[in-house]
Structures are given as C-alpha cells and as structure tokens.
Image (cartoon, rainbow, N blue to C red):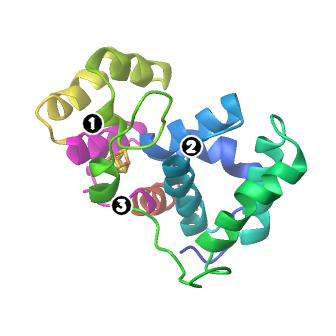
Amino acid sequence: CRDAAVPIESLDQLSKTSMPLCMRICHEHIRANHHIKHTGRMQYGLFLKGIGVTLEDSLRFWREEFTKKMDSDKFTRSYEYNIYHNYGKKGSMVNYTPYSCAKIIKDVAGPGDCHGCPYKNMDQGSLKSKLSSYGLSASAIEEVMFFVSRGHYQIGCGKYFQLTHNSSVEPSINHPNNYFEESQMAMGN
Ligand code: SF4
C-alpha cells in the first residue's frame, strides 16, 4: 500500500496515467454504466484499496456511481457490505489482498463483464482500437501486439508501460498495484 491516501477525485486522472489496462477499463466501465458485476467489483475495489483509497472514500465512490441507477437503500442492502468486507471490516475480518496478474489472467470474463486481463480477453482488433484510443501510435501498438499475440500478456503490459512512460526499461509486471507504484515513481510522485 502507498502511504498517502489517494482521493477518489483523482481517479479519472490516475486511470489515464498510472493504471494498467485491466483497471482503467474497469474504471471507465463504472463511469459509463454506473455498475459493474461482482468479479469486476472485487478486482477493481481491491486494487483501489491497494493504491491507498480509504474505506470512506471507497464507500463514497461506489455509492455515487451506483445510485445513479438505483436507490440508496438498495445500494446499502446489496453492495455496501462487500466494500466493508474487502477492507476487512465485516464478516471474517480478513484484510483481502488485491488480485495479482496471475489471478486476473485466469478469471474468465463473459458478455457484459469488464474484469480480467484485456491483453488476454479482448480480440486483437478490439484491443488495437483500445490502444489507439489511449493514444498509442500504430508502431507502438504493433510492439505491444507482438507479445500479446504470442500469449505473453504481462510482457505486452510491460511494453505498454514503457511506451506510455517514455521509460528506457520495460518493467516486469506481476501485479496491477505494482504497475501503479512503478508508474507513480516514474512520474516522480
Ligand atoms: Fe492487468 Fe496484469 Fe493484465 Fe497488465 S498484465 S493488464 S497488470 S492483469
């Protein structure tokens, strides 16, 4: 975990600069749909906890989004418990660990899901369009796709990091939270 709390007001910006694709896509899905299914909530919710979003801010973030589509009581009844639970404040009181790449890559995503590793789950055409919409040039996209098309998703993710941070080294990516930390360090934060 990072030492300083990350306010939810900074998430839109951070999703663009410092989140790996798996988390940026979840973030954008929530902003666009005001909802995300259970596995996505776990994947993204625990990631947010890991980057330093407090329990209070997490409750506010999910409530503000979900209540654009449902009433406040339903949110409290159906979703709030899980957020407390993720922070180890309810149920078994376990402080759950954010998911690693190995776990995320294994999670199978169905229609309407946004969780999982996009390098694995997206078809190549959609992935290329996504990378292009995130500002990568055609040649940069080919560099990433070289690894992705051979099933080396984490190396492709490291290449994306390198290209988007003007970094001379390509970090080895094992964990989305580690990606985030590396990004913040590369940006001098
Ligand atoms: Fe996320 Fe890991 Fe996939 Fe990168 S390789 S998008 S950090 S699951």
Q: Could you tell me residue 52's position as x and y percent? A: 63, 68
Q: Could you tell me residue 140's position as x and y percent? A: 30, 25
Tell me which amino acid carries mark 1. Lys
> Which is more foreground, mark 3 or mark 2?
2
Indicate the quadrant containing the C terminus: top left, top right, bottom left or bottom right. Answer: bottom right
The mark that comes first in sequence, 1 or 3, is 1
Who's the residue at 84% across and 42% down the image?
A: 67
Give residue 57's quadrant in the image. Answer: bottom right
> Which is more foreground, mark 1 or mark 3?
1
- Is residue 173 in sight in this rendering? no
Q: Mark 3 vs ligand 1: CB under 8 Å?
A: yes
User: Tag 3, which secondary structure?
Assistant: loop
User: Tag 1, which secondary structure?
Assistant: helix
Q: Which of 30 and 127 is in front in this view?
A: 30
Please state if 147 lies on the left or on the right of 138 as rendered.
left
Who's the residue at 50% across and 75% down the image?
A: 96
Tell me which amino acid carries mark 3. His
- The residue lying furthest to the bottom in this view is 93
Q: Name the residue under label 1.
A: 120
The circle on residue 26 is none
Give residue 115's quadrant in the image. Answer: top left
Query: Is mark 1 in CB contact (under 8 Å) with mark 3?
Result: no
Instruction: Classify 10 Å Cα crowding around label 2: few (below 14), some (14-19), many (20 and above).
Output: few
Q: Mark 3 points at which residue?
A: 175
What residue span does the magenta drawing correspond to?
153-177
Instruction: Classify 10 Å Cα crowding around label 3: few (below 14), some (14-19), many (20 and above).
Output: some
What separation in Å lies between label 3 and label 2 (alpha carbons)?
21 Å
Tell me which amino acid carries mark 2. Lys
Give residue 88's quadrant in the image. Answer: bottom right
Q: Mark 2 points at which residue?
A: 37
Q: Could you tell me residue 31's position as x and y percent? A: 69, 35
